[in-house]
Image (tube, rainbow, N blue to C red):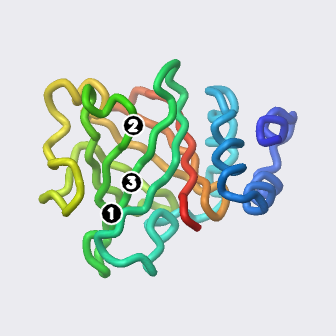
Amino acid sequence: MLKELLSKPSVDIADISATLDALDEATLVNETRTLGLKEQGVLYKAAKGFRQWTLEDMVPSINPAGKLVFHAGKNTLPAFSHFQKRFARPTPESKELWGFNEHTFRFVTGPGYFLARDSDGEVLVDYNHVPPSTPAGWPKVHPNTGLNSLTYGKMIDTLRGVSRRVSIGHADRQGKSMGYFVLVRLGG
């Protein structure tokens, strides 16, 4: 269904948003995971300026500080394309989120820690900065250096809002496109 909406000659982002908002969580994750490089690129371009996307969309402020909010993801890499980004608000008044990636090969690439911040109606996920301490229950925080720098080093993701729980992202490493990914906020 989502692939069909993105394959039309003229993409109607408002229709896509409404369609996604009407889906239950399992169907929403399944639909977003059908998207390949072409569809994710179309969606990223169509989402530009469509809706404000903020830290509140990533981690609603009703969540207590430190509570992780999971986002199911699908990237455009040829392998290991399913993952989660996990975000938390370090304090109730914080102007940034702390987070890391969870995936099958975390033991090789590391969790890829990041800080996220609002930026002109989009959210930037910055791997150049990591949480200053390790929250309870998290893997030990360390900089994205060494082997995991091959995956996360010098990377900044830009997230744009598509629907109430879906965002589309673009990964950039020092001006070079590293691909797209789609996220679904889990749990409502």
Q: Percent x, y for residue 187?
A: 55, 64
Q: What kind of element bears circle 3?
A: strand
- Judging by the rendered image, the residue that carries numbered circle 1 is 97
Residue 11 coordinates in the image, percent (x, y): 81, 43
Name which of mark 3 and mark 1 comes first in the sequence: 3
Which mark lies nearer to you, 3 or 1?
Answer: 3
In the image, is residue 130 above or below residue 133? above
Disc 1: CA contacts within 10 A as few (<14), some (14-19) or many (>=20): many
Q: Residue at x 25, y 31 (%)?
A: 107
User: Of helix, strand and loop, which one carries label 1?
Assistant: strand
Give the CA distance from mark 3 to mark 1: 10 Å
Q: Residue type at mark 2?
A: His
Other-residue count near label 2 (Cα within 10 Å), few / some / many at <14 / 14–19 / ≥20: some
User: Whole-percent x and y of residue 128?
Assistant: 23, 43
Q: Is residue 106 left or right of residue 60?
A: left
Pick the front one: 123 or 74: 74
Q: Quadrant of residue 10?
A: top right
120, above or below 184, in the image? below
Q: Which residue is mark 3?
A: 86
Q: Do the residues bearing badges 3 and 1 touch, measured as CB atoms within 8 Å?
A: no
